[in-house]
Image (spheres, rainbow, N blue to C red):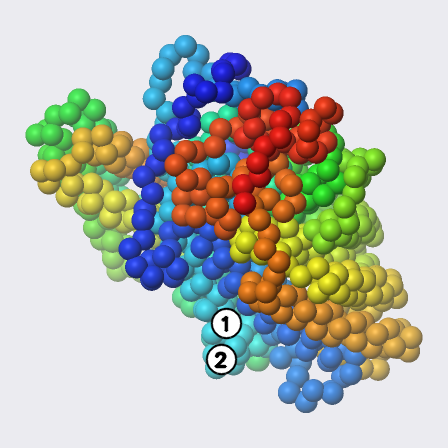
């Protein structure tokens, strides 16, 4: 369970940082009659939209799901019947596609920020297409592995591979639904630029997060994560 | 902090949101996006399925006291009843009612928002919850019946043919229902958290929030982090059961046949389950702590003692509850060093919890205590929680837990601390907020009858159970049979407990009748019958209209506990009253 504890420690650090700005040591019973305004530190930054906060909270939940699954991966790995599974070369292509998709959305975010609709549209379409390519590639990778005899129930390593890639794929699919909606809106004529900018922004954040999750999972499947854990263990001893 | 004269304050820190306005009866009362309606929907669904669980407990108790009296209860049914009773009560009743019910109703009103920040997701959350409840209830009608694996669903037994529902629909429906519930809860949970973060009215700093909101907020954050563990465990177990993987399933011979599983780790499931399961205790307890603080303060006409300490304790309990999960696994076998670690963290949680209990008692000290129904339930909660909590300190120690773990002592402990105590708060809270929800008071006499039956009755049920546990009467047994170490007096006591369980269960009918009767015949409550300070009592209409606040959002000038302020004209000053000296103010009708 160490992975999830590390994840929780990170979450706890964020919360402590946030709570430390909330005047938890104030004495509210002495502060009657005044309206306390939040301290903007002089700069008038626009408030963060609720949807964005909502997305970050949701990413926390998704992070918890994956760190728990990875915790289970490590715990199950300790038993003797575990044989690592080969990494199909296709996964490298998929990884590149997902990274490019994320980059395209970052580009879209910049274009949306500057209100350039004509270059925003191709960026969104590129991001969308690359993410679809990633999903198709993942399914192809599954087919290759199954054809090569690495079926789901044979070995826990296989089971975890299919389950984790499946879970990740479902999250990508959910993101794609939202991204498709945003892209369609970007092509319509009567769209409020502010709302669109926010949607693109959120899509970019989500896709970066899912890319990071994928990179960690990929490292896990490729066995680098295990080397890293071994290294830590050696250092600790 | 900036001092501003009251006239010149714009009504909201954040832009006033555009509300969704329903256009038909269906979108107003059924597929409603109004948190208040959703709260009532959540509550009615949760209480309904809770009544099913209540009947199940009756059936179990009848079987224990009069074995064979009801011929349709065999061992399989008994385990199915145990499982469904536990799962329904913990997740589908308590979690849903505290967070989905009270959370939805109270968060927007108490922080001065018009509604939740994502009303559509909020609506979906309820309907997905309802779907989860229906899937769960479908287990009763499925071939083979619901699962009888125990509410902890430990593999491998939960998916084997020896367990009711293990090879039938039961376990599949249970796991699917939990997965659906978690998805639905996440949608609601995002709402509760983000509304507290972003939807607060101007002047409502975190340290001015009522403790109810603190409790629900912290519990929701915990639930968002803990439910994923149950989610992952359920998905993995579904894989094991349906697709033949071996995440949790060791090599096993069932009925003479070698199963295809091998090498899986049942302990892994236990870790995942209790990583959710222990925070779950506090997911239920923290909202109860918060609500009880507000009830005590309001009905003792005194500010809450140690508000800051109460807030810190809520946050610290929430954080600590994530590092104690393995104290549920002492008997599963573990490294003694781990046992020591988890026993220590478990005992440390008692410190912030005890601080809360002291603060409640000190709030009562020299307060102007009104023994209203909410107050009675709050007092009953304190006593019950202390009782249940103290036996928790026993069980937190490895050497005490190991012999007691499989006895009725544990049943008595967790029913006291996690069953009766939060339920008492739920009752108190319903008596307290029913006037706001419906505009009418609940009947006092019926309420008194309900309170005394419930309070004394639950003690009559669960106090003797500790004694049974110390005698060594095992839990989970369908019948004792010829068990030499169980003396005849234990059987007599079992009959007594069962009779009391039937009485307490029947007593709840008084409450249900009261809920319905008062809806039509109850005394008109007015806007603020308890003369309380928090914002939900200051709405222009009672019950609050769609959008809660009329034209302008409230502005908050003080904390939630200005009761009996010296020199003030009234013994309470609502949070939205500007000047620092209390002024008389018309209470909105």
Circle 1 marks a residue in which chain? B
Relative to B77, B300 lies left or right: right
* Helix, strand or loop at mark 2: loop
Q: Which residue is mark 1?
A: B137
Residue pictured at 48% horizontal, 65% vertical = B133
**Residue B545 on image: x %, y %:** 43, 48
Q: Which residue is mark 2?
A: B141
**Residue B90 on image: x %, y %:** 61, 59
Residue B351 in view, yes or no = no
B68 and B357: which one is in front?
B357
Q: Are marks 1 and 2 on the same chain?
A: yes
B245 and A235: which one is in front?
B245
Q: Mark 1 Cα within 10 Å, few/some/many (few <14, many 20+)?
A: some
- Considering every residue shown, the one lying at the far bottom of the view is B71
Q: Mark 2 Cα within 10 Å, few/some/many (few <14, many 20+)?
A: few
Residue A168 in view, yes or no = yes
Q: In the rendered image, which quarter is residue B146 located in?
A: bottom right
**Residue A65 on image: x %, y %:** 45, 46
A221 and B299: which one is in front?
B299
């Amino acid at each position: 369970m160490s992975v999830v504890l590390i994840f929780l420690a990170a979450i706890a650090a964020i919360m402590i940082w946030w709570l430390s700005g909330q005047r938890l040591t104030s004495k509210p019973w002495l502060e009657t009659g005044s309206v306390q305004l939040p301290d903007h530190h002089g700069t008038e930054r626009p408030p963060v939209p609720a949807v964005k906060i909502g997305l970050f909270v949701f990413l926390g939940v998704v992070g918890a799901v994956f760190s728990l699954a990875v915790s289970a991966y490590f715990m199950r790995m300790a038993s003797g019947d575990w044989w690592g599974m080969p990494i199909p070369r296709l996964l490298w292509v998929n990884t590149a596609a997902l990274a490019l998709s994320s980059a395209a959305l970052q580009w879209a975010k910049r274009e949306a920020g500057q209100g350039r609709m004509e270059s925003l549209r191709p960026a969104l379409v590129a991001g969308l297409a690359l993410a679809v390519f990633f999903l198709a590639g993942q399914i192809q990778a599954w087919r290759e592995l199954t054809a090569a005899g690495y079926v789901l129930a044979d070995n826990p390593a296989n089971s975890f591979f299919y389950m984790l890639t499946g879970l990740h794929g479902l999250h990508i699919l959910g993101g794609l639904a939202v991204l498709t909606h945003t892209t369609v809106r970007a092509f319509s004529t009567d769209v409020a630029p502010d709302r669109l900018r926010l949607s693109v922004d959120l899509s970019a954040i989500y896709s970066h997060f899912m890319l990071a999750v994928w990179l960690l999972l990929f490292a896990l499947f490729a066995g680098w994560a295990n080397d890293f854990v071994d290294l830590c263990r050696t250092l600790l001893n | 902090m900036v001092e501003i004269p009251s006239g010149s304050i714009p009504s909201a820190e954040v832009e006033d949101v555009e509300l969704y306005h329903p256009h038909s009866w269906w979108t107003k009362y059924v597929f409603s996006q109004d948190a208040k309606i959703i709260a009532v929907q959540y509550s009615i669904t949760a209480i309904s399925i809770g009544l099913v669980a209540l009947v199940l407990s009756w059936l179990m108790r009848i079987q224990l006291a009069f074995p064979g009296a009801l011929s349709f209860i065999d061992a399989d049914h008994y385990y199915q009843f145990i499982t469904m009773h536990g799962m329904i009560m913990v997740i589908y009743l308590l979690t849903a009612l505290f967070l989905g019910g009270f959370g939805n109703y109270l968060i927007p009103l108490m922080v001065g928002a018009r509604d939740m920040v994502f009303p559509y997701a909020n609506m979906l959350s309820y309907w997905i919850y309802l779907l989860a409840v229906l899937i769960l209830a479908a287990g009763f009608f499925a071939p083979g019946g619901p699962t009888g694996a125990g509410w902890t669903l430990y593999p491998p037994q939960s998916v084997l043919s020896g367990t009711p529902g293990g090879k039938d629909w039961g376990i599949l429906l249970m796991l699917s229902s939990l997965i659906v519930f978690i998805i639905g809860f996440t949608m609601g949970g995002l709402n509760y958290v983000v509304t507290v973060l972003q939807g607060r009215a101007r002047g409502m700093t975190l340290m001015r929030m009522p403790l109810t909101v603190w409790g629900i907020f912290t519990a929701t954050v915990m639930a968002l982090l803990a439910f994923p563990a149950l989610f992952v465990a359920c998905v993995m177990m579904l894989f094991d059961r349906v697709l033949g993987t071996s995440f949790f399933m060791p090599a096993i011979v069932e009925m003479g046949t070698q199963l295809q599983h091998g090498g899986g780790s049942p302990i892994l499931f236990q870790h995942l389950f209790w990583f959710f399961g222990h925070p779950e205790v506090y997911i239920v307890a923290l909202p109860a702590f918060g609500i009880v603080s507000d009830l005590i303060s309001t009905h003792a006409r005194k500010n809450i003692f140690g508000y800051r300490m109460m807030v810190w304790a809520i946050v610290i309990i929430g954080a600590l509850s994530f590092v104690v999960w393995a104290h549920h696994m002492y008997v599963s076998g573990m490294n003694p060093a781990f046992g020591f670690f988890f026993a220590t963290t478990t005992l440390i949680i008692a410190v912030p919890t005890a601080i809360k209990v002291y603060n409640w008692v000190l709030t009562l000290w020299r307060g102007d205590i009104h023994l209203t129904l909410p107050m009675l339930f709050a007092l009953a909660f304190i006593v019950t929680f202390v009782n249940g909590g103290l036996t928790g300190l026993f069980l937190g120690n490895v050497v005490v837990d190991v012999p007691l773990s499989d006895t009725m002592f544990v049943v008595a402990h967790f029913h006291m601390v996690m069953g009766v105590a939060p339920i008492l708060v739920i009752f108190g809270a319903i008596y307290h907020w029913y006037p706001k929800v419906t505009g009418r008071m609940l009947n006092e006499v019926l309420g008194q009858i309900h309170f005394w039956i419930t309070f004394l009755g639950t003690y009559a049920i669960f106090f003797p159970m500790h004694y049974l546990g110390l005698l060594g009467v095992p839990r989970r047994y369908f019948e004792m049979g010829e068990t030499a170490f169980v003396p005849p007096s234990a059987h007599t006591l079992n009959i007594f407990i069962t009779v009391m369980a039937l009485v307490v269960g029947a007593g709840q009918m008084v409450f249900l009748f009261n809920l319905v009767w008062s809806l039509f015949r109850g005394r008109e409550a007015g806007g603020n019958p308890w003369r309380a300070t928090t914002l939900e009592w200051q709405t222009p209409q009672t019950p609050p209209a769609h959008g809660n606040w009329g034209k302008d959002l409230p502005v908050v000038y003080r904390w939630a506990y200005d009761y009996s302020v010296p020199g003030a004209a009234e013994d309470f000053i609502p949070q939205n009253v500007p000047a620092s000296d209390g002024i008389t103010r018309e209470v909105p009708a």
